[in-house]
C-alpha cells in the first residue's frame, strides 16, 4: 500500500559521533535478531515501539485502525503519522496480498492508475498513462505539461527535463500523445538512474523555485524519525534508503494532488526480521504534491480467536514543500488530514482482503 499524496488540508550527513554510536549499536543488535520484534509479545512490542501505548489487540482484531501523528520532527518539511491494525490472515498471506494490492478500484483514494515494472524500466512500461481518465485533475496535469518549458512551476522536474518537452497538439484524449511520450521518458530515465545510482543518482527538482534533492529529503526524514530509525535498521541499511542494495520491485502511479494529477515512482523492499517481517515503500519521485514519501511496516504474527493473524505497525513519513510553510493549527490540520487519508486507505485494503478470502 502507498500513500503518494499530501492531503489537501495541509498542503545526509550524521551529526557527529554521539549520533552515530547509538545507530551503529542498534544496527548491530538488529542484525543479530535481538531487537524487540523477536519477543513473544507482539502487542507489547507495538506499545513499546510506537506511539500507541494503550493498544488493544482485541479492538484491533475487531477492525479498529489506529492512526495518530508521530513525534514532531525538527525537519520543517517533514511530517510523520503512525498507524496500527490487524489483518485476519497469517503473516505470509498478509504480506503477499499487501504487496499486490491496488487502490485504483477505490475512487475515494484518488489513485487513477498504478502498475509495477521490472528491471530498470523503459518508456513502454508507462504507456498506461494513455488510458488515464478524463477528469479535471488529469486534464490540469496535461495542460501544465503542454506549457513546458516556458512555464514549469506546477511540475517537479529538473531544468533539463523541462527543456526536453518537444510540444505537440492537445488532441488524443485526456493525455495527448506528446504528454504520454514525455512523461514515459521522464519516468523511465529516473527509474534507470535510481536502479543504477540509488537516491544520489537522481536529478534534482529545479522547476518549482528551489533546488531539492530527494536523497537529502529522505535522509532528513530518517534522521528525524526517532526510534523508527533503530527499529527499521535492518531494512533501511539493506536498501537504497540507507545507501544499500537495489530495489526488489518498482511501481508507478498516477494520482490526484489537490486538483492537479501527478505521476510518481516507488520502490519496495521486504525482509524477515526475527519472528516477524519488515517492509518499506520508498516514493523517490513525484511530479507534484510531495518531494518524497517513506512508509515502513512491521508485521508480527499473532493469534486471534484461535486463528493466525497479523499485527501491523505502519509509519508514514512525508516531505513536502507546503509543510515547510505551515505552523501551529495549520500544521496540526495537515497532520489530521494525513491521518484520515491513511485510515481510509487501510480500511479499503482490509475490506478488499476480507472480500477476497
Image (spheres, rainbow, N blue to C red):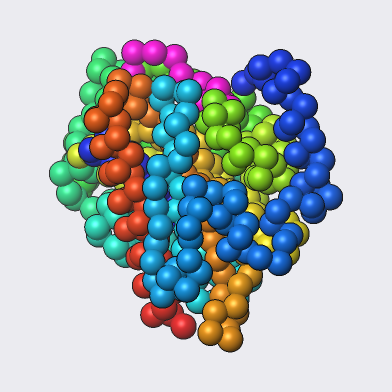
Quarter location, residue 115 = bottom left
- Does residue 8 show up? yes
Q: Position of residue 98 (x, y in %)?
A: 51, 64
Residue extending farthest to the left is 136
- Tally of numbered tags: 0
Q: In the picture provided, is 82 more to the left or to the right than 13?
A: left
Residue extending farthest to the front is 54
161 falls in the magenta region: no
Residue shown at 68%/62% (left/top)? 276
Q: Nearer the viewer, residue 155 or 49?
A: 49
Residue shown at 40%/57% (left/top)? 66
* Magenta region, residue range: 208-219
Q: Nearer the viewer, residue 211 or 223?
A: 223
Quarter location, residue 258 = top left
Task: Determine whether 305 is above or below 121 in the image.
Answer: below
Q: Position of residue 178 (x, y in %)?
A: 31, 35
Q: Nearer the viewer, residue 170 or 46?
A: 46
Q: Position of residue 304 (x, y in %)?
A: 54, 79
Q: In the picture provided, is 182 more to the left or to the right than 85?
A: left
- Does residue 177 show up? no
Task: Determine whether 105 is above or below 170 in the image.
Answer: below
Task: Determine whether 181 is above or below 128 in the image.
Answer: above
Residue shown at 73%/32% (left/top)? 23
Residue shown at 34%/48% (left/top)? 339
Task: Determine whether 127 is above or below 152 in the image.
Answer: below
Q: Position of residue 300 (x, y in %)?
A: 62, 64
Amino acid at each position: 500500500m502507498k500513500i503518494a499524496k499530501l492531503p489537501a488540508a495541509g498542503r545526509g550527513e550524521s551529526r557527529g559521533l554521539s549520533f552515530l554510536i547509538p545507530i551503529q549499536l542498534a544496527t548491530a543488535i538488529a542484525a543479530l535478531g535481538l531487537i524487540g520484534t523477536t519477543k513473544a509479545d507482539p502487542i507489547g512490542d507495538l506499545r513499546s515501539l510506537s506511539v500507541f501505548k494503550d493498544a488493544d489487540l482485541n479492538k484491533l482484531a475487531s477492525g479498529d485502525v489506529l492512526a495518530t501523528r508521530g513525534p514532531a520532527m525538527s525537519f520543517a518539511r517533514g511530517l510523520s503519522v503512525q498507524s496500527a491494525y490487524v489483518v485476519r490472515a497469517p503473516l505470509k498471506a498478509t504480506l503477499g496480498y499487501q504487496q499486490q494490492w491496488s487502490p485504483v478500484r477505490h475512487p475515494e483514494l484518488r489513485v487513477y492508475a498504478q502498475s509495477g515494472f521490472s528491471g530498470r524500466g523503459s518508456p513502454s512500461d508507462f504507456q498506461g498513462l494513455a488510458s488515464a481518465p478524463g477528469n479535471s485533475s488529469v486534464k490540469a496535469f496535461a495542460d501544465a505539461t503542454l506549457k513546458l518549458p516556458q512555464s514549469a512551476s506546477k511540475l517537479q522536474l529538473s531544468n533539463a527535463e523541462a527543456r526536453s518537452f518537444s510540444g505537440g497538439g492537445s488532441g488524443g484524449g485526456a493525455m495527448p500523445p506528446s504528454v504520454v511520450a514525455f512523461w514515459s521518458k521522464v519516468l523511465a530515465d529516473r527509474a534507470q538512474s535510481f536502479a543504477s545510482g540509488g537516491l544520489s543518482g537522481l536529478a534534482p527538482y529545479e522547476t518549482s523555485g528551489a533546488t531539492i534533492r530527494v536523497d537529502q529529503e529522505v535522509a532528513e526524514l530518517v534522521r528525524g524519525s526517532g526510534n523508527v530509525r533503530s527499529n527499521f535498521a535492518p531494512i533501511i541499511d539493506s536498501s537504497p534508503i540507507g545507501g544499500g542494495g537495489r530495489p526488489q520491485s518498482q511501481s508507478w502511479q498516477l494520482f490526484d494532488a489537490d486538483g492537479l494529477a501527478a505521476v510518481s515512482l516507488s520502490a519496495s523492499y521486504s525482509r524477515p526480521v526475527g519472528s516477524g517481517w519488515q517492509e518499506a515503500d520508498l516514493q523517490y519521485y513525484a511530479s507534484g504534491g510531495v518531494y518524497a514519501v517513506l512508509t515502513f511496516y512491521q508485521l508480527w504474527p499473532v493469534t486471534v480467536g484461535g486463528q493466525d493473524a497479523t499485527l501491523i505497525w505502519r509509519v508514514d513519513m512525508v516531505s513536502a514543500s507546503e509543510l515547510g510553510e505551515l505552523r501551529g493549527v495549520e500544521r496540526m490540520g495537515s497532520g489530521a488530514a494525513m491521518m484520515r487519508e491513511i485510515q481510509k486507505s487501510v480500511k479499503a485494503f482490509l475490506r478488499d482482503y476480507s472480500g477476497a478470502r
